[in-house]
């Protein structure tokens, strides 16, 4: 399944990223991190979601970088996943999202920051 993250078809890559999060197989962490740079927004969204489900701290820094994505849904999912992981390293980046142009991104940043407080 992991190899399908490199498929030529963006729909296959997007679906694979989503499914890999459900499997909770930590071998998928590095390939999913690489998928955060995919040209397709849905692949990036699903990869960020899967990384949150895998709850592996290796994904914290790449998810922090994904908070700068041009697509609000990618930023939203990266922030949500960082909240689920609960690593304090995300605090400063999540604070910056409190002034994001998208209200849903601001909202999820609040959730994520609350979760960081509760976990640390």
Image (cartoon, rainbow, N blue to C red):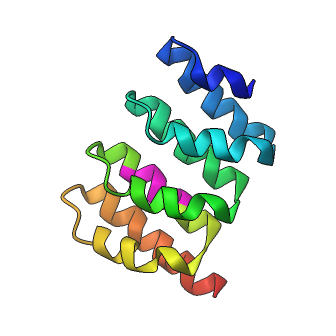
Quarter occupied by residue 38: top left
Numbered marks: total: 0
Across and down, in percent, residue 103 comes to: 26, 58
- Could you tell whether 99 is left or right of 47 in the image? left
Quarter occupied by residue 21: top right
Q: Along the line of sight, which residue is nearer the eye, 34 or 64?
A: 34
Across and down, in percent, residue 33 comes to: 57, 46
- Please identify the dominant SS of the magenta region: helix
- Could you tell whether 40 is left or right of 54 in the image? left
Q: Residue furthest top?
A: 9
Relative to 96, residue 26 above or below: above
Quarter occupied by residue 117: bottom right
Q: Which residue lies furthest to the left in this view?
A: 101
Residue at 23 percent of width and 55 percent of height: 102
Across and down, in percent, residue 118 comes to: 61, 84
Relative to 87, residue 5 above or below: above
Across and down, in percent, residue 8 comes to: 51, 12
Residue at 45 percent of width and 79 percent of height: 91
Please say whether residue 64 is one of the residues in the magenta stretch: no
Rendered-image quadrant of the C terminus: bottom right
Q: Read off the magenta span.
A: 75-81
Residue at 78 percent of width and 43 percent of height: 27
Rendered-image quadrant of the N terminus: top right
- Could you tell whether 31 is left or right of 114 in the image? right
Residue at 64 percent of width and 38 percent of height: 31
């Amino acid at each position: 399944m992991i190899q399908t993250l490199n498929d030529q078809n963006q729909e296959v890559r997007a679906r694979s990223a989503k499914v890999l999060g459900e499997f909770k197989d930590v071998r998928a962490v590095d390939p999913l991190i690489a998928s955060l740079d995919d040209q397709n927004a849905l692949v990036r969204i699903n990869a960020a979601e899967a990384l949150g489900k895998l709850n592996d701290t290796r994904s914290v820094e790449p998810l922090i970088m994904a908070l700068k994505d041009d697509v609000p849904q990618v930023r939203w999912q990266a922030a949500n996943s960082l909240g689920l992981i609960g690593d304090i390293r995300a605090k400063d980046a999540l604070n910056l999202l409190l002034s994001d142009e998208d209200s849903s991104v601001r909202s999820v940043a609040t959730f994520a920051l609350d979760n960081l407080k509760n976990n640390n």
